[in-house]
Image (cartoon, rainbow, N blue to C red):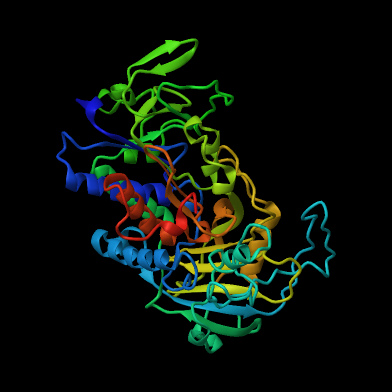
Amino acid sequence: MASERETIVIIGAGIIGVSTAYFTAKKLAEKYTADKRPRLILLEQCEPGCSASGKSGGFLARHWSDGTDTEKLAQFSYDLHAKLAAELGGADKWGYRAVDTFCAEIDRIPIMPAKQHKSSHFRTEAESVVTSIEVIAPRSRRSSPAAATMEYSLPTTPSEDNMHQNSTHASISVPEIESVKVVEPETVPWLRTNVLTKLRQVGDTANTAQVDPLKLTRALLAEAKARGLEIVRAKVIDVAETGYRPPLIEFPVDNCSRGKTAIDEEFNIVGPSSAPASTSLAADSPVGMQDGWSKPMTNKPYILQLDQGSDIPADKIVVACGAWVTSCLRWEAFREVSASQIPIQGLRVHYLLAKPKYDLPAQAVFAEINGTVYSGEDAIEIYPRPDGSVFVCGEALDDPEMPPHNPFEPIYSKRATSRLKQIVNDVSPALSFDIIQYGLACHLPVHAKGIPVISKVPNTRGLFVAAGHGCWGILNGPATGLSVSELLVDGQPTSLDLSNFRLDR
């Protein structure tokens, strides 16, 4: 009977949740016959890859986390990306390819007068220049900070541990200082030579690569669905242990409902109240009512209450909803998890997608702009893609923040996107382009110490958290998903040691 089958629920259809779904579905299909296979359900409030997983550069580097707690994770996941691309046709499906990578030092570029950035910061026109963010070399785990970072990190207590993590994992850094070589400006012919002061090659086709992250996320989702994954659009209001339900303080909200979309049709995504009988979420959950609250009658340890439709009884639950992961702190079953164990917030980063004047080679460029005012505001990254588009990101604004409840809610700054467009126009004649998509932003899920959480919740029967990967979410997504699938199906990770990523570390 269906009620005797184990039910696994994954919350969040970003790269972490989808990778977990893919590898879990694959392992279950190999281990069980169809009639005994556990049910695998993926819950997504909006659309697959609707936030950072669909709006990032998709840069992959094998050795750029060396010397940090994520070294083995990054190396293993980089190799896993290549394996997935070979097995599933990643070059065609999600633009996987090896790239040469460069750090370009650009001379001071004056920009438009800036409006007030924060209540305590005003800038004159003379002060309005692009912020510099430098590439650094990693250090051993106990060496002192030596240079500025090139990515975004949360403000933390300046202890030795925090200084180490913020300056390594939370940074995009050069693997070894001796491996960096100065090259001729003509090596990257689409940059303006009159503003280029130095060009360094920081990676090659043996150790750096790229993907289109939205296409990767949805390709893995399609593979998981072909192996039995059920996909449901719904927002989780609470996760409770069966037999106990406290009063709820959150009202049901519209879960990004925009009617039936092309994505819904492509992946057969259903709403909880309209699921067909064969995939109904109520199939395992006869529901009674008592004092206005649904009371589950099930032998499963957990019950997920959704913003609409029937509750979902579950044996195991994975929370993988990126910058929204702290939502689980309000859920009854996660009452023993503290905010200090998952200090993850969203860092708002802007990007644009454009069509250049001519096709660009397989090169990724990190632009370091000289003449700075703020430290850490502008990290300009330029990624030409195989489909002929160019992805440009940067302009991380203000401090990390809680993202809006609705990932589709506009969050971009007009000033930031205009500034980003002006910067890229100034550094490249090829990038004086027609904009395909403009005025876009997303929230990177950033952990205060720069280390993701990949862990079972201690002293629970089947609760797991996988989030906080920051700028390396696309790189480390496959290895994270594989490791979580091993926790779910085998009871312990076998591919990687996850001790660095425990909630109780």
Determine whether 62 is above or below 212 in the image: below
Placement of 102 over or under 2, stated as above or below: below
Q: Picture coordinates of residue 29 (x, y %)? A: 20, 45
| Residue 210 image offset from top left, x and y in percent | 42, 66
Going by the image, does 330 lie left or right of 239? right
145 vs 230, left or right, is right
> Is residue 463 in sight in this rendering?
yes
Query: In the rendering, at what x and y percent does residue 484 appear?
Result: 36, 50
State left or right for residue 118 relative to residue 166: right
Residue 191 seen in the figure: no
Residue positioned most to the front: 459
Rendered image quadrant of residue 156: bottom right
Residue visible at 42% across and 53% down in the picture: 214
> In the image shown, does 34 or 270 lie closer to the viewer?
34
Q: Quadrant of residue 394?
A: bottom right
Residue 216's x, y, as percent? 37, 55
How many tags in the picture?
Answer: 0
Quadrant housing the N terminus: top left
